[in-house]
Amino acid sequence: QEQLVESGGGLVQAGGSLNLSCTGSGYKFTSTQVGWFRQAPGGEREFVASITWTGWPHYADSAEGRFTIDRNKTTVYLQMNKLKPEDTGNYYCAVGGWRSDRESYEYWGQGTQVTVSS
């Protein structure tokens, strides 16, 4: 059974930075892609970034150039720089899927809240 725990969210001013962590346990965490998604109040859950088991990243257009995804055997990180108010939302990590295909991900964490003030 896969278990995912996100941490690192918080309140930050626009232009600031946060580093999110997703700690996982289970076979799929170390052998499949891990993705980060976010969901704003009233909005759909949208793709932010993903990383393969070999470390290849993939980013949404909104994250390209500002966010960096990285991983080791137990944790996937999302370094977020130059944050904007529109980055506000609950951030989830997920495993077992393919890049931005939300429906393909099999297991999800509970999320960590990110709030960017203007």
Image (spheres, rainbow, N blue to C red):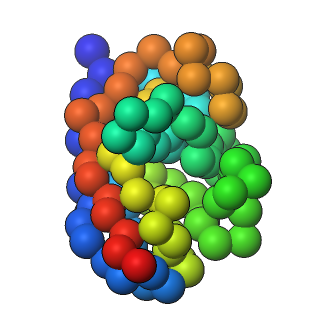
Q: Is residue 80 above or below residue 73?
A: below
Q: Is residue 53 above or below residue 26?
A: below
Task: Point out the image quarter for the C terminus.
Answer: bottom left
**Residue 71 at x, y = what percent?**
50, 55
Q: Is residue 1 left or right of residue 92?
A: left
**Residue 109 at x, y = what percent?**
30, 32
Would you identify the image quadrant in which residue 41 lies?
top left
Q: Is residue 23 above or below residue 15?
A: above
Residue for point 38% across, 50% down: 89
Residue for point 59% across, 39% down: 47
The answer to which of 98 and 1 lies nearer the viewer is 98
The answer to which of 47 and 20 lies nearer the viewer is 47
Residue for point 49% across, 29% down: 44
Residue 112 visible, this orientation: yes
Total number of numbered labels? 0
**Residue 43 at x, y = what percent?**
46, 34
Residue for point 27% across, 53% down: 113
**Residue 1 at x, y = what percent?**
27, 15
Q: Is residue 60 left or right of residue 49?
A: right
Residue 4 visible, this orientation: no
